[in-house]
Image (spheres, rainbow, N blue to C red):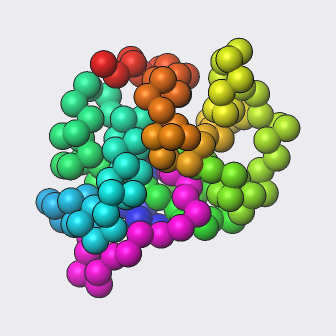
Amino acid sequence: MIGTQQASTCFYLPTPPELTEKWSHLDVDATQALIELNGNHWRKVLTIMAKIVVKEQDWRQYRDRHLLKQGESIAIGANNLCREAQLHIICGKKSADDLNLDSAEFVPLDMQGTSLLKHPNKDIYLCPYLDYRQFPNIQINLLRQALGLAPLN
């Protein structure tokens, strides 16, 4: 688990980033250190996470100062949903498979046939992997709308 153990939102990802022994999600520069260790790929992952959950419009500041410190965590290769979280964002088919989630039990968020699905009775969302080619801003805003958040500019 990366981030706070009492997170209300849990992102499920298939592969972990590299972390140093001294790295802590509570460090002031935690996300910057994670990006420096893992490169552009994890910058994109953290950016999309911030864009999904930020309440205000400044997702950059949220990513750099607050992400994973307050309300979010990342479960890597999980085979069970995090009990503490109320919102579960399953990123990519591998993560859904690891959790034994059947996409047939989920409903699409829109009629355009995007790959965003929601469980009809729980706050569980099946999403593409957190990469701009698979999860562009238009889909990020669609998910934000489903979560009751305003679209980002």
Residue 126 shown left or right of residue 41 in the figure: right
Q: Is residue 20 above or below residue 47?
A: below
From the top left corner, tell me how far across and down residue 116 is, in percent.
64, 32
Residue 144 in view, yes or no: no
Instruction: Tell me if 105 is positioned left or right of 70 in this view.
Output: right
Q: Position of residue 21 (x, y in %)?
A: 29, 84
Q: How many marks?
A: 0
Q: Residue most toward the bottom?
A: 21
Q: Quadrant of the C terminus?
A: top left
Residue lying at 21% horizontally and 59% vertically, measured from the top left? 32
Q: Is residue 17 magenta?
A: yes
As displayed, is residue 99 above or below residue 1?
above
Task: Judge left or right: residue 36 versus residue 98.
Answer: left
Q: What stretch of residues is rendered in magenta?
A: 8-25
Q: Position of residue 81 (x, y in %)?
A: 64, 56
Q: Main secondary structure of the magenta part?
A: loop
Q: Which residue is at 26% across, 75% downward?
A: 23
| Residue toward you, 87 or 49 | 49
Q: Position of residue 17 (x, y in %)?
A: 41, 69
Above-or-below relation of 48 to 92: above
> Which picture quadrant has residue 76?
bottom right
